[in-house]
Image (cartoon, coloured by chain):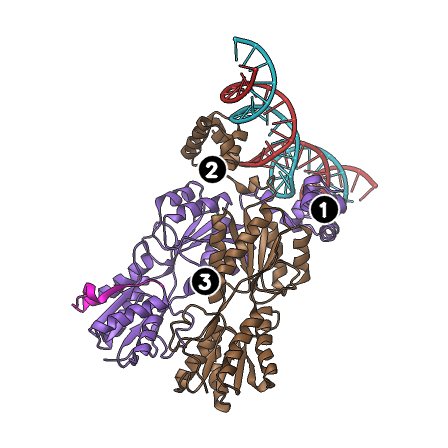
Chain colours: A brown, B purple, C cyan, D red
DNA sequence: AATAAAAATGCAAACGTTTTCATTTTAAGG
DNA sequence: CCTTAAAATGAAAACGTTTGCATTTTTATT
């Protein structure tokens, strides 16, 4: 009979496998962690014993010695968001490649909640963590630093970031789309952005947009700068209201979701895009390319960021924390599609 | 100086806290797991010591005794999918309420990959697991059963399911949208569905659709039943091709994503929805309500399913596995919007 | 074939908690 | 204020693995 507590759980332990394979538990452990140090015949015996018993190792017990738990954290503002879910998917599957597991949590754009979340992840002894953006409470950052947990900031690239970052240049993204509209001759432009509070990605994009206004000696009046949540319906509603009183020739949206809402608003109003109104977004989400008209936007490589972040974190704890070139800028591409035209 | 290995990690352990608070480690442990058994003054001292030291408990070490790890698994076909990400978000945040953490993985619609994933989750000693759908390989199911891990199947409701299930009646969803078209007088209907292989949700929906055809003594010819991946662009392309040779008066889509593609195809072709073509979807994804025209579809309460699944799993290991009413059917609502009209 | 070096394995002590059981402290009852 | 029961705390043995060190076995060298 197996030991009491284990058999209660209904699962055999390493010593059961060892007994059945007639080796010591140490060898079984080695078989799993470093197969080539055990001789082929022994290996075969252990393999068989483990299979017969349906043994599954307990990585928790293992990671008490192991310095590493094989688990890596990811904190996003929200999971339910076209662009982050693409990132998450890539991050998770890349971790799987490295035999690591992802622990994920969302703070719902409330940075304060990050402190509880980081704590909870730390209690699970994560080997590293990826945080979206550069804006973070000091408390969790200190907890991570104190424990020497590798951290990367993802999504937004910032050359001056104090922690390694992997992302795109959101300032440039904003600049790109705004410049495109100016190049097409637009001067009466409305800007619709999400709240930039605690959201450095949106903030940088907006700075990029504004930089173009400035360089064109144009003024972005508050009247032409609207705030809108990340929601197609809200964006649509807001746009319909805006268009009642104001008739810009173009709209710059802080992200593609808002753009979708704006385009639908135009369709509802019987306005023609792009003849009556040019629209640009940022992100290039699923659907942006295929809607009618196709959305002119900037493609941000979410998948690539996720993959890079996973690789970076893994290599950080394989080689010891410090990493050579900490900051990684991923490139974006301007997608010129049907939603924009010359005035 | 703290103990060697701990100080290497840079983190204080329970004994450090105990020493500082001048109590035994046992009491500190009790303080965290069962605060009311420790007297207020002691509690205060421990609280202070823990704060001063920046102590964070090691739940891994704890769960060697604890029977429970506080981690619950979720396996989805893919994370990057409007409907699942809503589910995931709800599941995760509900777990957070219960002080549990989510371990998530995606198998990319390859059921075989579930075996490796389940194994990996088991190695992390999850307390329970939610699986999307009813179609699963026997191997992982056995691993779970052998260890008495609570399992729920989510998304699809099936009264005869062998494991507890929480979901909507997908057969009924399919029936509903098809019936709606028939009621509007449509007889020449094209059906576009994702591959139903290993996808019981899609399979049930399709059965529902077919049941309506049957009850109307109509035949759904293979020519009018097309397979399409979960991708707006692909759906759009496919639709444009279909419409070259065939002119149905209505299209039933296996999910809203396909519907979006179909609607965009019509717009690209200059067809009017719903006059020239009525379109129904299933799911009611973000955007479906706000696009032009609004998509007629069936709302499946993803959030509610996620929340229920989390609660169920938690209560399953709080009360011991067996649960009273195992199967939970969540209701859906038919959303009659602008994409459908009488012939 | 004998010896040295290398490879494979075993033994036992960790790892940081929780928990049982024993002990001490506090509260209750007279 | 003494006795007894209850509440709070402590001591030490788990939990299932890994790992340093010791031992045995194999391989290479002469």
Check disc 1 and report its element: helix, strand or loop: helix
Q: In this view, does B104 lie above or below A318?
A: below
Splitting the image into 4 quarters, where does residue B22 fall? top right
Q: Position of residue D27 (x, y in %)?
A: 50, 22
Number of numbered callouts drawn: 3
- Residues in magenta? B212-230
Q: Position of residue B287 (x, y in %)?
A: 42, 73
Q: Distance between the residues labelled 2 and 1?
A: 34 Å
Check disc 3 and report its element: helix, strand or loop: helix
Return the residue at label 2.
Answer: A11
Q: Distance between the residues labelled 3 and 1?
A: 40 Å
Which one is in front, A338 or B326? A338
Q: Where is residue B89 in the image (x, y as percent from the top left)?
A: 49, 62
Same chain for labels 2 and 1? Say yes or no.
no
Which is in the foreground here, disc 2 or disc 3? Answer: 3
Splitting the image into 4 quarters, where does residue B116 fall? top left
Q: Which mark is residue B17?
A: 1
Q: How far apart are marks 2 and 3 (CA)?
A: 33 Å
Crowd around label 3: few <14 · some 14–19 · many ≥20 (10 Å): many
Return the residue at label 3.
Answer: B85
Splitting the image into 4 quarters, where does residue B176 fall? bottom left
């Amino acid at each position: 009979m197996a030991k009491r507590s284990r058999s209660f759980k209904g699962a055999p332990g390493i010593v059961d496998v060892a007994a059945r394979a007639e080796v010591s538990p140490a060898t079984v452990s080695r078989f799993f962690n470093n197969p080539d140090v055990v001789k082929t015949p022994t290996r075969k015996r252990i393999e068989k014993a483990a299979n017969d018993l349906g043994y599954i190792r307990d990585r928790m017990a293992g990671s008490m010695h192991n310095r590493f738990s094989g688990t890596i954290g990811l904190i996003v503002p929200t999971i339910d968001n076209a662009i982050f879910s693409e990132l998450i998917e890539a991050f998770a599957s890349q971790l799987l490649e490295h035999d690591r597991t992802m622990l994920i949590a969302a703070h719902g754009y409330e940075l304060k909640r990050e402190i509880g979340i980081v704590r909870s992840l730390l209690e699970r002894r994560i080997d590293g963590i990826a945080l979206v953006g550069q804006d973070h409470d000091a408390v969790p950052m200190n907890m991570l630093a104190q424990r020497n947990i590798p951290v990367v900031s993802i999504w937004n690239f910032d050359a001056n970031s104090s922690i390694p970052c992997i992302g795109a240049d959101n300032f440039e993204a904003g600049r790109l789309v705004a410049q495109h509209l100016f190049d097409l001759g637009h001067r009466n432009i409305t800007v619709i952005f999400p709240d930039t509070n605690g959201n450095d990605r949106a903030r940088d994009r907006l700075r990029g947009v504004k930089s173009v206004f400035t360089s064109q000696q144009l003024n972005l009046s508050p009247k032409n700068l609207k705030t809108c949540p990340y929601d197609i319906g809200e964006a649509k509603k807001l746009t319909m209201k805006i268009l009642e009183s104001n008739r810009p020739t173009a709209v710059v949206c802080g992200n593609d979701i808002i753009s979708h809402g704006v385009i639908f608003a135009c369709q509802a109003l019987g306005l023609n895009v792009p003849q009556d109104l040019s629209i640009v977004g940022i992100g290039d989400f699923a659907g942006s390319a295929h809607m009618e008209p196709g959305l002119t936007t900037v493609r941000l490589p979410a998948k690539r960021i996720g993959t890079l972040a996973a690789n970076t974190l893994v290599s950080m704890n394989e080689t010891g924390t410090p990493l050579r070139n900490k900051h990684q800028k991923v490139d974006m591409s301007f997608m010129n599609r049907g939603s924009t035209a010359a005035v």
